[in-house]
Each structure stands twice: as structure tokens, then as C-alpha cells.
Amino acid sequence: MKLKIGKLAFCAFIIFILNLCAISVVSNFKNPTVNVLSKQGDKTEEVKKIQTALADKGYYCGQVDGVFGDATKEAVTNFQKDNNITADGIAGSKTLELLGVTASNNQNNQTSKYSDADMSLLARIISAEARGEPYSGQVAVGAVVLNRIGHPSFPDTLSGVIYQPGAFSCLTDGQINEPVDESAKRAAQDAMNGTDPSGGAIYYYNPEKTTNSFMLSRPVITVIGKHKFCS
């Protein structure tokens, strides 16, 4: 009799453990962990927090501007080395935890500003304007379009920026109607998620094809592939 009770108790215990595991799995399914990170090219409020934390710890002495540039990446890398974590220059969850920065879901916040039609249109303009360019150059072209939306010299919608008269040559030479490259679709997603390899540029041009004196006079921020990105 004692043996039977013991077996029943053991079985009940196993069932209890299995139920706990099932509850945990369901809970995690309903509340998936968001893998948030900040990396070079990003321009977000989270980057400002990272820069501030790095400055407080003596790793960063640049401007707290929310732009994840070379200086920020170097500071993050040095911090990671000193804390014995992977020194990849990317502020992932562990780096943010050690810095005391609360992660925010930047990607979802950025993308939610735009519709599927906006995403499709941006991918089309990237494909037409930057076909054959390095991937970072494709993302940079997308970022330029998005940077113009918040600039007083340009329309305040994505379609307004793209269809502004004279803004993009692909609208007149028919390239806008060509099939969209898969890389351009990914680049549009990255640009809408806040990645900006252009460094905040609002213009770009190919010096081999451009004779426009205004464009040639713009201060160059960076060069990616055949394009110069300017302020």
C-alpha cells in the first residue's frame, strides 16, 4: 500500500512539473523576447542613451547626437573588451544591460510610421536609383529619402518626396518601372528601421554622371560605391 501511494505521489509530481513547463512555453509564445540592438548607422533616441552612458563611464567624448557613427562604435567596442563580452561594436542586450540602458524596440517604432505602400515605393526607388551599388549604398539611398521627409526643404510624406518634380531621374528615364531587386526590399526595411549609412544626408549623386553645380557644391558626408552623400 505504501509503495502504491509512493508511486502515485511521484506521478503527481511529474505531472505538476510538466504543467509548469507547458505554462512557461505558452507564456513565452504569447510574449516573445524582442532582440533589440543598436548598431553603426542607426539614428535613434536609444543611441543617445548609449552615448550618454558611455560618456559617463569615460569611453565616449563625442557629441551626444543619437547618431551611431565611428566614434560611438569604437567606444562600444572598447567597453565590450573591458567587460569581457563579444567586442563587435554592436550594442546588443548584454551591452545595454551592462551600460544600464533600457532597451527599446526601435525597429518596430520606426517601421510603424510607414504603410506597406510606403515600403513598396521606397524599395522601388532604391532599386531604380542604386541598382548594382553596395548594399550599404542601397540602404543609404533609402535613408536619404526618409531624411528628406523631416527636412523643411522637402515634402513631409514619402510619396511627396519621391514624386517631387526633378528629385529623382529614374522617374523620367523609366527605371522606376523596372522589376524591384530583392536587395532593395531588404534595404528599404533597414532604412525604415532607422539604419542610415549616409550619416544624415539629404542629397546624393554620382560624380561621373552629374554636372549640376548645386549638387557638386554640397558638402560631402560620405562616399559609398559610386555615390557621394551630402548635406
Image (cartoon, grey):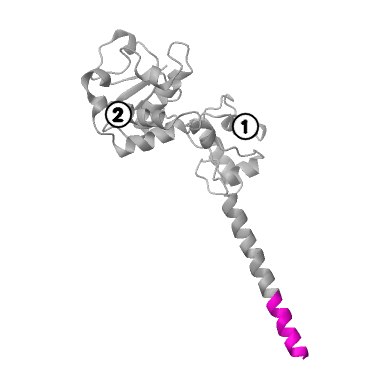
Q: Which residue sits at x=46%, y=29%?
A: 114
Q: Secondary structure at mark 2?
A: helix
Image quadrant where one finds the C terminus: top left
Query: Disc 2 marks which residue?
Result: 130
Q: Residue furthest bottom?
A: 1
Whether residue 203 is visible here, answered yes or no, is no
Residue density around tag 1, few if under 14, some if 14–19, many if 20 or more, within 10 Å: many
Q: Nearer the viewer, residue 228 or 22?
A: 22
Q: Nearer the viewer, residue 147 or 90?
A: 147
N-terminal label among 1 and 2: 1
Residue 145 numbered mark, or none: none
Q: Which residues are magenta?
A: 1-12
Quadrant of residue 203 within the rendered picture:
top left
**Residue 116 shows in the view:** yes
Left or right: 22 with respect to 221?
A: right
* Outermost residue toward the top in this view: 213
Disc 1 element:
helix
Residue 89 part of the magenta segment: no
Residue projecting furthest to the left: 173
Residue 36 image position (x, y, % from top left): 55, 42
Magenta residues: mostly which secondary structure? Answer: helix
Amino acid on which disc 1 is placed: Lys
Badge 2 crowding class, 10 Å Cα cut-off, few under 14, some 14 to 19, many 20 or more, is many
Tell me the number on the disc at residue 49: 1
